[in-house]
Amino acid sequence: MEEQILYFGMEGGGERIIRASDDGEIKFIRRFTYMKYDLDDWDSKEEPISSFESYWSKFTGDPKWFRFCPVFIHEDIFTMVLESLQKIDLKSLSESEQSKIHEWVRVLMENKYKTDYEFKRICREHQSRYRFYDLQVWFDRNINVLLDEDGKKGLNFYSGFEIFSSVKKRYPDFRKPLYCNLLRSEHIPFNFFIPLDNDKEFGKKVFNEILGGIIDHITQIIIEYSPQPKQKYLDDNTSFDTYIEYRHIDGSNGILGIEVKYTELSYPLLDKSREQVKMYDLTSLYYTMSIRSGIFQQENLTYLRNDDYRQIWRNHLLGESILIVPESKFRHFHSLNFYPEGNIHIKEVILQYQNFLKDECRDRVQGITYEQFFRICQKHLPNEEFGKWLEYLERRYLTT
């Protein structure tokens, strides 16, 4: 029985490595074709090799081994090929060599992301190009995930406004999804909102465009926040991606609870999880807080535990619960959901969710696209430093 594990082409020929099994013994064979004397006359040969490891070591001994054109890479040699690629200094490549590297990566990762829906596929490729061309570093085992050493340098974050210092202060221990994953949304609140914390007047102007001028001044911005003790609120692990306290123009205090999405969609309830139990318990805080808030159109709220609405509901309710507790010092709350225009799912879900609210309360849950946010920021940029930050955001997150 024979199985191809590597196939690549070259000018005037091609080469295959075959793994053969004969009565339980594994053998490796090198088969290659070539054009004789620059004529349209082809010949082929084969020879045994002791192991793929020895063959690959010799093959990659040539520092330009990647100049050949890959056609097929078996999953069994994925790690070996990837580790060889990761040794190449991306900063030293010419434009033609970059295209060759892209071909090796494309074939290596072929079929790995079959389950991506279209917008996620576009964003994954966009973040991979950003990693390759802007950061000029390699990926781990996924094209959108930095190597640990590069994540620890803060490459997933904008270099200004001490953003990475804020990350390390908030999460001093290395967290790979936050530090290394270019595609997930955990890092985005730091890149978006830490600069607004550096210039709260700028932040006020931005959010006043979204909210209709209700903010007198912003008092604090916190990334990843959940009020404590949690038993007073929703008694779960719901938190805001970004939490903003402000003084309202009427003299009272208000809060903004921000959720940031990138390519994420809804998520299913885990069977028999604590969340599932609470979602199906009509006496849980999710339902009692919803009724006490007085903002929903009907008291039968079970539709909100639907996969599409559940997270929006929880984040919205967390803010409403802060207003409801007896000793609350806050009178105003808005739940803001940031997402890119291409994430049509989030846009539609927010519009549907607003229909469950009383007419006068619909603006308490809003959707803001990245594109809208960037346009608003552009109008109020305080200086050139913020202009460079905005250019980074647009280059980093906009796919068109």
Image: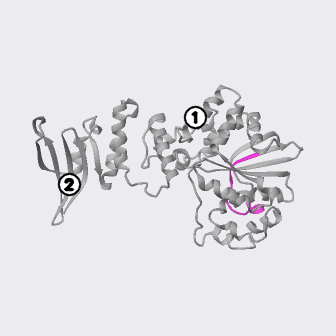
Foreground: 149 or 356?
356
Where does residue 155 sit, x and y in percent of width and height?
52, 38
- Residue 241 among magenta residues: yes
**Residue at coordinates 42% horizontally, 49% vertically from top-left?**
141
Q: Amino acid at mark 2?
A: Ile
Foreground: 340 or 63?
340
Q: CA distance from mark 1 to mark 2?
A: 46 Å
Local secondary structure at mark 1: helix
Foreground: 112 or 286?
112
- Residue 236 among magenta residues: yes
243 shown above or below 94: below
Name the disc covering residue 122, or none: none
Where does residue 88 sit, x and y in percent of width and height?
35, 36
Residue furthest out toward the front: 40
Q: Residues within 10 Å of mark 1 (few under 14, many from 20)?
A: some
**Residue at coordinates 59% horizontally, 45% vertically from top-left?**
187
Q: Which residue is mark 2?
A: 18
> What is the quadrant of residue 221 in the picture?
top right
Colour option used: one colour
**Mark sitting earlier along the chain (1/2):** 2
318 shown above or below 173: below
| Residue 142 shows in the view | yes
Q: Which residue is mark 1?
A: 392
Looking at the rendering, the stretch of residues picked out in magenta corresponds to 230-244
Nearest to viewer (mark 1 / mark 2): 1
Q: Amino acid at mark 1?
A: Tyr
Where does residue 98 sit, x and y in percent of width and height?
37, 35
| Residue 158 shows in the view | no
> What is the quadrant of residue 114 in the picture?
bottom left
